[in-house]
Amino acid sequence: MKLSIKEVEHVAELARLELADVEKERFTHQLSNILTHIDKLNQLDTNNVEPTSHVLPVKNIFRDDVNKELFSEGNSLNNAPDKDKGYYKVPKIIEEA
């Protein structure tokens, strides 16, 4: 499928893109090649091909949730630059109204 420069200009306008004349020529050629390839793909007989969303079968692999303590309160606060009564202490960033 051969695109015209006018069609490329229209697509660029829809995308709010400003193209130089050299870019219009290049994109006309590139987009024409892409559409030609898509036309070839549309000619393939896919009647007996089951629709898929992935090339390979994708399955979720689940594991059992196991409750365990990774860090004690003391360990998790060891690297805190400032702490108070078991909590991280951070600078105030919101002013009261």
Image: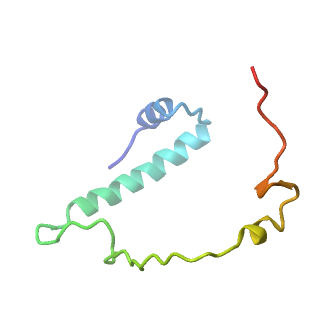
Q: Check the image and name the residue furthest to the right.
A: 81
Q: Check the image and name the residue furthest to the front.
A: 85
Is residue 22 toward the left or the right of residue 42 in the image? right
Vertical placement of residue 42 versus 46, above or below? above
Where is residue 61? Give x, y as percent: 39, 78
Which of 39 and 82 lies nearest the eye of the viewer?
A: 82
Which of 68 and 55 lies nearest the eye of the viewer?
A: 68
Where is residue 23? Give x, y as percent: 58, 43
Q: Check the image and name the residue furthest to the left.
A: 47
Residue drawn 34% across and 60% down? 37
Vertical placement of residue 13 versus 75, above or below? above
Residue drawn 44% across and 31% down? 10
* Corner quadrant of residue 83: bottom right
Vertical placement of residue 25 versus 42, above or below? above
Is residue 11 toward the left or the right of residue 46 in the image? right
Is residue 89 toward the left or the right of residue 56 in the image? right
* Marker count (numbered): 0
Q: How is the image coloured?
A: rainbow
Is residue 37 toward the left or the right of residue 48 in the image? right
Which of 41 and 59 lies nearest the eye of the viewer?
A: 59
Residue drawn 27% across and 56% down? 39
Where the C terminus falls, by quadrant?
top right
Where is residue 1? Give x, y as percent: 32, 50
Which of 4 and 97 lies nearest the eye of the viewer?
A: 97
Residue drawn 83% across and 61% down? 80
